[in-house]
Image (spheres, grey):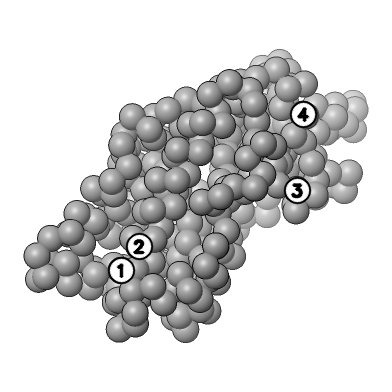
Amino acid sequence: MANTLESNHWNKGNKGVKYLVENSKDMKMVPLEFVLPIPEGERPSMAIDGSIPIIDLGGLNGPDEQRLSTIHAISSACAQWGFFRVTNHGIEVSLIDEMLRVVEEFFNLPLEEKMRYCSENVMDPVRYGTSLNTTKKHNLHWRDFLRHYAGPLPKSYHLWPDNPPTYKQVAKEYLKEVWQLKIKIFRAISEGLGLDPDYIERSLGVEGTQMIASNYYPACPEPNKTLGLAPHSDHGGLTILMDNGIPGLQIKRNQTWYSVPSIPGTFVVNLGDYLEVSVVIFFLSHYR
């Protein structure tokens, strides 16, 4: 009976964690495929409540003294945390809300519509998937995702989801604004290192690469046994994470996990591995 139950969970899970939860009556336990080997002292419930540095980016447009103080605050946050939260970032709350709305609508689409973008090839320009869309069994993550490339001139724009009907236009506008925010932060980090403001942009390439990753985390019956994402660092230059008002982000500093409180309307900025190497700063940042 146990093997049959696990097999049923596996088959449903291949269609996404959302589908698994919605089609498993009164799920009380996490299927074994999702149980992760998390040391007792590192379980999510053991994380300490904490707060990463909060930086008002409006200071970059202020008088010289205020501008230099803001740049110093960013440099300090990079050196001590590898993470910081930004306010007064210049992106309208209404656009953030619209982006959240179309992403939620996408994940609420019928399964057949989402499966049009299902792929195990990490190089595909548009990709919908779950930790379960693989034929090889392994420990799995409690999330579904939609990813696609973007950038100032998104060559794959025609491949982006055409349902919800407003997804393409909203995502294009949102990603354009996030791109500008990225430039602003890169310039501040460069100046904080005593380099030309455009140093990091040049080192990463004139055109650069942008990718959006939208994750869906269904309610979990045993949240202490699994994770939406296992501990990791991002391999890109910079991750700009939208705060949607739902807590759950945890970061690791000096071997201690911290639960980061939610502040809607802000963004959490995470230095990626590539940026650390590019500017010869070893700010190791891990989160889940």
Mark earlier in primary sequence (1, 3): 3
Q: CA distance from mark 3 to mark 2?
A: 28 Å
Q: Is residue 104 visible?
A: no
Q: Pointers 1 and 3 in contact (CB under 8 A)?
A: no
The residue lying at 67 percent from left, 44 percent from top is 156
What amino acid does circle 2 point to?
Ile
Task: Check disc 2 and report its element: helix, strand or loop.
Answer: helix
Residue 26, image quadrant: top right
Q: Which residue is mark 1?
A: 188
Image location (x, y in percent) of residue 48: 37, 54
What amino acid does circle 1 point to?
Ala
Q: Which residue is mark 4?
A: 115
Q: CA distance from mark 4 to mark 1?
A: 41 Å
Residue 185 is marked as 2
Task: Check disc 4 and report its element: helix, strand or loop.
Answer: helix
Residue 193, image quadrant: bottom left
Q: Is residue 34 left or right of residue 73?
A: right
Q: Which residue is mark 3?
A: 124
The residue lying at 32 percent from left, 54 percent from top is 85
Q: CA distance from mark 2 to mark 4?
A: 36 Å
Mark earlier in primary sequence (3, 2): 3
The residue lying at 38 percent from left, 53 percent from top is 180
Q: Pointers 2 and 1 in contact (CB under 8 A)?
A: yes
**Which residue is more in the foreground, 243 or 32?**
243
Task: Check disc 1 and report its element: helix, strand or loop.
Answer: helix
Mark earlier in primary sequence (4, 1): 4
Residue 89 is marked as none
